[in-house]
Amino acid sequence: MGDVLNLRLARKKRDRQREADNAAARRLSFGRSKAERKIEGAQRDKSASNLDGHRIGSGEANEVAGRETIDRDRRSQDERQS
């Protein structure tokens, strides 16, 4: 015969192990230090400003060349809505 097992204690042990595994997975995905979050935010801001600096404006040069001006923000909003 096998050993006698208290099912209530076994169930609690199993639940604790599941919670510990879930917590470990969440720490990997969300657990970052304040310095890491700050560095990522600075990199995101820098890349956004760099992209904006290279964007073609809707100034006089486009009108002289006969190019149609594009409102990029409006176009991206229209794409999100559809």
Image (cartoon, helix red, strand yellow):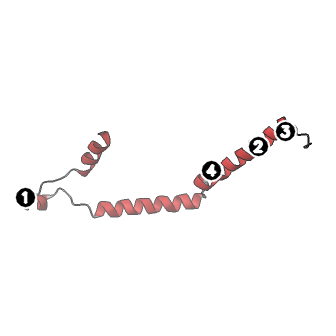
Label 1, label 4: how far apart the Cα atoms are: 54 Å
Q: 61 or 70, which is in the foreground? A: 70
> Which tag is nearer the camera, tag 1 or tag 4?
4
The residue positioned 61% from the left and 56% from the top of the image is: 28
What's the distance in space between the residues labelled 2 and 3, CA to CA?
Answer: 9 Å
The reply to whether callout 3 and callout 1 are in contact (CB within 8 Å) is: no
Mark 3 belongs to which amino acid? Leu
Residue underneath mark 1: 66
Instruction: Name the kind of residue labelled 1 in the image.
Output: Gly
Q: Nearer the viewer, mark 2 or mark 4?
A: 2
Task: Measure the alpha-carbon separation of dots 3 and 1.
Answer: 78 Å
**Tag 2–tag 3 contact (CB < 8 Å):** no
In the depicted view, which residue is nearer to us: 7 or 26?
Answer: 7
Q: Mark 2 — residue?
A: 14
Please tell me which of labels 1 and 4 falls first in the chain.
4
Query: Secondary structure beneath disc 1?
Result: loop
Across and down, in percent, residue 46 comes to: 40, 63
Q: Which amino acid does label 4 sit on?
A: Arg
Task: Name the residue tied to disc 3.
Answer: 9
